[in-house]
Image (cartoon, helix red, strand yellow):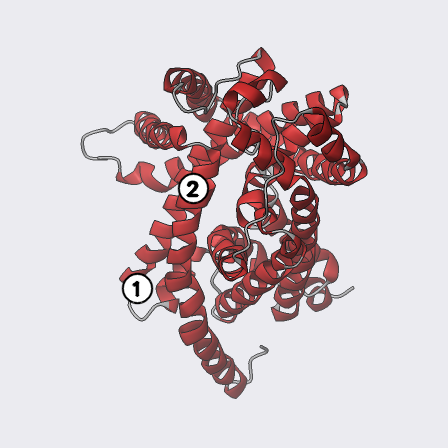
C-alpha cells in the first residue's frame, strides 16, 4: 500500500475514530448517568436519537477537521484562530473546553466517591440531608487525585488504553446483561409494593432538543483529539474517520439507551420511593446516579458487579488525572513565571487550583453535573462550534481548496 493509500485507509481512519470513541465512551458514559438523563427517560426514542446526535456531531467534526486539514493545522488552537473572523475569538472554544473538563473531573470525583461508598456499605452518599458524608468521600477521592496528578501521570497514561478497552467491553456486557435480565424488573415491582413504576417523560420535543442537539454540542470535547489525530491523514481518511466514529459512537450509545429505557421505570420508581427505601439495597447512593451499577446489583451477578465497580473506579481516576494534566500543561507557563521560577512548583499550584475547583463542583452530584454543566456547555457549543462550522468552516474550506487547485496542488 502506497503512502497516499495509507493516509486514507480505513485502518488509519479506525484508529482516529477510536480517539473519539475513547473520549465519549469513558467513565461518564459507562455509568449510564448521561444516557438516562438525555435519552432513556424519554422512552423508545432512546434507541433513535443517539444515532441522530452522533450523526450531527460527525458532520460538524468533518467540517472543522476538513478545514484544519486543507490549512495544515494539527491542533485545535491554530484551527479555531483561523476559523473565527478574529484570532482572539479562539478563546470562545477555550472557554467551552475548560468548562467541560472541569465538569468532567467533578463528575469523576462524585462518581468515584459513589463507588467507594457502595464498597464500604455507605448508603447516604449524595442523599439530601447527608452533605457531610458526601464531602468526606469526595475529599478522599480528591486527595488521591492530587497525589496521582503530581506523581503518577505516567502510570495512569500507561494504563488508560487498557482501561478504555476494558470499560468498552464491560459496558457491552452490561447492555447484554440488562436486556437478558429484564424479567428482574417485573419481579422487583411485584416484590416491593413501595415501588410504583415511573412514567416516561412525554416531552418528545425536549427529548429531541436535549438528546440530539445539546448532547452533540457538549460532545464536541472530542474535537481537539480528532484534529490532532487526523494530522497524518488525507481528506478521504478524515471523511472515513468521521463515518466510523458515527457508527461506533451512535451504535453503542443507542444500545445503552434502549437497555436503560427498559429499566428506567424501575430505577426512577425507586428514587421516587425515597432514600429510606432504596438505601436497603446498598447501591452506594441514588439508584439513577450510576444506573448501570444499579442494574448489575439487581441482576445479582456478584463477580460482574465487582469487576465493573473496579474498572469504573479506575476509569474515573484515569480520566481525571489525564484531564487535570492537560490543564496543568496548558496553564503552567502562565502561573506567575516571573515570581515562581520553579516549573514543578507552578505545575503543582495549577493542579491544586484545578482540583480544588472540581471539588467545589462535585457536591452537585453526577446527575446535576451532566444535566446542568454539560447541558449549558452544550448550548454554548451550538453558538461557538456548530454555527461557526456552518458559516465559516465550510465556505473557507471551499475557498482554500479552490486556491490549492488553482496552484496545481493536490487537495
Residue where numbered disc 1 is placed:
87
Question: In the picture provided, is 346 more to the left or to the right than 196?
Answer: left
Report x, y in % for residue 256.
Answer: 67, 45
| Secondary structure state at the residue bearing disc 1 | helix
Residues packed near mark 1 inside 10 Å, few (<14), some (14 to 19) or many (20 plus): some
Cα–Cα span, label 1 and label 2:
23 Å
Q: How many marks?
A: 2
Residue 209 image position (x, y, % from top left): 49, 60
For this orientation, the residue located farthest to the right is 180
The picture places residue 241, in percent across and down from the top left corner, at: 65, 60
Report the side of 29 relative to 359 (left or right). Answer: right
Closest to the observer, 53 or 338: 53
Write the residue at 30% across / 62% down. Answer: 89
Q: Residue at x 22, y 35 (%)?
A: 336
Q: Is residue 229 above or below residue 345?
A: below
Look at the picture and state if 239 lies above or below 319. Answer: below
Q: Which residue is mark 2?
A: 101
**Secondary structure type for disc 2:** helix
Residue at 61% x, 58% y: name it. Answer: 49
Observer-side mark, 1 or 2, equals: 2
Name the foreground residue: 408 vs 206.
206
- The quadrant of the rendering that contains the N terminus is bottom right
Closer to the camera in the image, 236 or 110: 110
Pointers 1 and 2 in contact (CB under 8 A)?
no
**Outermost residue, bottom direction?**
406
Amino acid at each position: 500500500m502506497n503512502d497516499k493509500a495509507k493516509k486514507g485507509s480505513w485502518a488509519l481512519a479506525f484508529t482516529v475514530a477510536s480517539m473519539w470513541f475513547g473520549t465519549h465512551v469513558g467513565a461518564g458514559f459507562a455509568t449510564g448517568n448521561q444516557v438516562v438523563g438525555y435519552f432513556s427517560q424519554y422512552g423508545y426514542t432512546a434507541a433513535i436519537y443517539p444515532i441522530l446526535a452522533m450523526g450531527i456531531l460527525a458532520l460538524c467534526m468533518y467540517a472543522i477537521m476538513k478545514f484544519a486539514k486543507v490549512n495544515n493545522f494539527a491542533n485545535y488552537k491554530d484551527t479555531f484562530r483561523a476559523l473565527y473572523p478574529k484570532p482572539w475569538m479562539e478563546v470562545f472554544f477555550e472557554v467551552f473546553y475548560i468548562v467541560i473538563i472541569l465538569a468532567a473531573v467533578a463528575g469523576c470525583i462524585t462518581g468515584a466517591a459513589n463507588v467507594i461508598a457502595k464498597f464500604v456499605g455507605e448508603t447516604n452518599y449524595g442523599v439530601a440531608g447527608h452533605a457531610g458524608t458526601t464531602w468526606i468521600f469526595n475529599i478522599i477521592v480528591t486527595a488521591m487525585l492530587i497525589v496521582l496528578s503530581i506523581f503518577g501521570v505516567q502510570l495512569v497514561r500507561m494504563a488508560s488504553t487498557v482501561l478504555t478497552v476494558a470499560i468498552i467491553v464491560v459496558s457491552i456486557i452490561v447492555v447484554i446483561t440488562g436486556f437478558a435480565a429484564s424479567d428482574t424488573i417485573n419481579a422487583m415491582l411485584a416484590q416491593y409494593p413501595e415501588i410504583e413504576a415511573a412514567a416516561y417523560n412525554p416531552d418528545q420535543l425536549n427529548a429531541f432538543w436535549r438528546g440530539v442537539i445539546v448532547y452533540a454540542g457538549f460532545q464536541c470535547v472530542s474535537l481537539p483529539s480528532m484534529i490532532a489525530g487526523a494530522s497524518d491523514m488525507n481528506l478521504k481518511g478524515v471523511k472515513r474517520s468521521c463515518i466510523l466514529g458515527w457508527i461506533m459512537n451512535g451504535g453503542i450509545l443507542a444500545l445503552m439507551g434502549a437497555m436503560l429505557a427498559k429499566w428506567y421505570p424501575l430505577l426512577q420508581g425507586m428514587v421516587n420511593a425515597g432514600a429510606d427505601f432504596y438505601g436497603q439495597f446498598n447501591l452506594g447512593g441514588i439508584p439513577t446516579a450510576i444506573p448501570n451499577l444499579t442494574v448489575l446489583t439487581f441482576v445479582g451477578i456478584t463477580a460482574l458487579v465487582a469487576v465493573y465497580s473496579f474498572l469504573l473506579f479506575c476509569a474515573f481516576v484515569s480520566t481525571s488525572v489525564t484531564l487535570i494534566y492537560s490543564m496543568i500543561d496548558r496553564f503552567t507557563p502562565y502561573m506567575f513565571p516571573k515570581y515562581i521560577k520553579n516549573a514543578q512548583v507552578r505545575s503543582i499550584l495549577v493542579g491544586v487550583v484545578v482540583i480544588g475547583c472540581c471539588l467545589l463542583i462535585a457536591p452537585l452530584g453526577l446527575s446535576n453535573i451532566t444535566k446542568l454543566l454539560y447541558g449549558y456547555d452544550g448550548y454554548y457549543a451550538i453558538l461557538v462550534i456548530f454555527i461557526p462550522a456552518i458559516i465559516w468552516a465550510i465556505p473557507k474550506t471551499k475557498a482554500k481548496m479552490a486556491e490549492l487547485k488553482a496552484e496545481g496542488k493536490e487537495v
